[in-house]
Image (cartoon, rainbow, N blue to C red):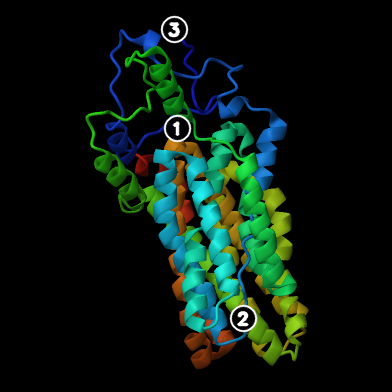
């Protein structure tokens, strides 16, 4: 039984594997050169088991279904910052698990398990009778948000490199618009709609991870023929203990973060802008209530400033994804506009003006995040989930810690000087993307 070997990422450029990926590949079975007839692979452009060959309408159905708007519950102070931070801490822990496990067991089992748990813990959060219960269940909710680390990898599974810009941009949008719209439309509708979408996911989603599909295909052939020689190039070596395979997978995001200069630098770059955006998420409502006398409902509308330029930037980033490092330069530069928001709000300038400042910060994050995810998917291929997961962990830690430290900062220095301090920190990181443009290819060769 001969098969036509087809690249998993045609027409992508040459595959890049850093030492971490090469180490993980050692756990795959070694196929002798004279066993081509037993090599299980996708059989050309008509093989419907290859996600790259699926109908376009079904690919986009999966993309749309993957857009889970997981909005933050925004209770009144003093719990607002803690609830937002505990959610992000849960996402950080979850990303360390869901990303590598999806590369071992496939995307579908991880999504199905986490979606089920998300619905359960969402109901438990709504039924909480104490702050401690609410905090605990929100942490578990955050852990079950697999989409934040897997969605961009799903786009990499379904689309070739030249077509990934639009899917990744769309998949990056809902998790960020959620915290913006949450204070406006409320948490109860969000939890109900989120549960419905996640249950529907069971009936629509099928495995997209090509290595897992090929492993299943090889296993089926071995079972049907009784011939144990059938293997894919992604089958794990039977001599490798299962605990070793699991350990290698779980350690991979951490290894990539500390061992890959590219992942480390990009993680810091996007985490700065993400942390600043979460400062605004947890700070806007009290500022507009106390400074401008907005009602609680009207204060929620202040979040629209954060969202307005994101919509524009989503379209722009689709075209700009090939210059990810230069985009990061402008993303970090726009993050310095926190100072514009801070000083205008402190001096009670017309409320639309500070909203413009918040919109610019949101724009900066989108300029940074979308090309970054596309870049990691392009260069890490089957290990893209671990690479993206590594950036998500630091990003969520920043979103956990920075908002909690921002409140004492504002209490001591006020909105003006407090945001000026944040600006000075952002300025320090502006040269990082430019250095990556100059030395990125060289850095990718080193662990």
Real-space Cα distance between discs 1 and 3?
21 Å
Q: Against 211, is 218 above or below?
A: above
Residue at x 44%, y 21% (from the top left corner): 220
Label 1 belongs to which residue? 212
User: Left of 53 or right of it: where is 2?
Assistant: left
Q: Residue at x 73, y 56 (%)?
A: 312
Quarter location, residue 276: bottom right
In the rendering, at what x and y percent does residue 119 appear? 58, 60
Q: Which corner quadrant holds the C terminus?
A: top left
* In-front residue for pair 48/278: 48
Which residue shows up at 43% across the image and 67% down it? Answer: 397
Give the residue at mark 2. Answer: 75
Q: In the figure, 315 relative to 77: above or below?
A: above
User: Of residues 372 and 241, which is closer to you in this image?
Assistant: 241
- Residue 28 figure quarter: top left
N-term mark: 1 or 3: 3
Pointer 3: what residue? 1
Q: Is residue 238 left or right of residue 71?
A: left
């Amino acid at each position: 039984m001969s098969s036509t070997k087809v690249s998993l990422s045609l027409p992508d450029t040459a595959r890049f594997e850093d030492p971490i990926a090469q180490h993980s590949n050692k756990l795959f079975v070694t196929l002798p050169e004279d066993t081509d007839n037993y090599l299980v692979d996708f059989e050309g452009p008509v093989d419907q088991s290859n996600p790259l060959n699926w109908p376009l309408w079904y690919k986009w159905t999966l993309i749309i279904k993957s857009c889970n708007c997981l909005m933050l519950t925004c209770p009144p102070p003093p719990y607002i910052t803690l609830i937002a931070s505990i959610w992000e801490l849960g996402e950080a822990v979850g990303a360390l698990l869901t990303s590598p496990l999806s590369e071992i067991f496939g995307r579908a089992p991880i999504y199905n398990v986490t979606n089920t748990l998300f619905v359960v813990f969402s109901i438990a959060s709504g039924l909480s009778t104490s702050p401690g219960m609410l905090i605990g269940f929100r942490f578990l909710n955050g852990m079950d948000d697999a989409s934040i680390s897997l969605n961009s990898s799903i786009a990499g599974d379904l689309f070739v490199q030249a077509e990934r810009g639009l899917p990744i941009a769309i998949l990056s949008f809902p998790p960020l618009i959620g915290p913006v719209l949450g204070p406006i439309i409320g948490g109860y509708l969000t939890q109900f709609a989120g549960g419905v979408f996640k249950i529907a996911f069971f009936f629509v989603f099928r495995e997209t991870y090509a290595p897992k599909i090929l492993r299943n295909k090889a296993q089926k052939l071995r079972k049907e023929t009784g011939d144990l020689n059938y293997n894919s190039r992604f089958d794990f070596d039977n001599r490798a203990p299962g605990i070793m395979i699991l350990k290698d997978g779980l350690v991979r995001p951490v290894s990539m973060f500390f061992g890959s200069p590219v992942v480390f630098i990009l993680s810091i770059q996007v985490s700065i802008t993400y942390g600043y955006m979460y400062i605004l998420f947890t700070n806007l409502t009290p500022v507009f209530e106390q400074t401008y006398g907005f009602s609680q409902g009207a204060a929620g509308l202040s979040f629209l400033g954060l969202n307005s330029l994101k919509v524009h930037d989503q379209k722009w980033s689709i075209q700009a994804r090939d210059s990810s490092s230069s985009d990061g330069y402008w993303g970090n530069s726009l993050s310095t506009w926190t100072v514009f928001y801070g000083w205008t709000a402190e001096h009670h300038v017309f409320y639309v003006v500070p909203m413009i400042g918040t919109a610019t910060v949101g724009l900066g994050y989108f300029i940074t995040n979308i090309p970054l995810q596309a870049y990691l998917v392009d260069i890490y291929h089957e290990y893209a989930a671990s690479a993206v997961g590594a950036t998500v962990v630091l990003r969520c830690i920043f979103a956990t810690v920075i908002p909690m430290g921002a409140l004492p900062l504002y209490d001591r220095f006020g909105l003006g000087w407090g945001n000026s301090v944040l600006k000075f920190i952002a300025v320090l990181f502006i040269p990082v993307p430019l250095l990556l443009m100059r030395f990125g290819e060289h850095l990718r060769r080193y662990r």
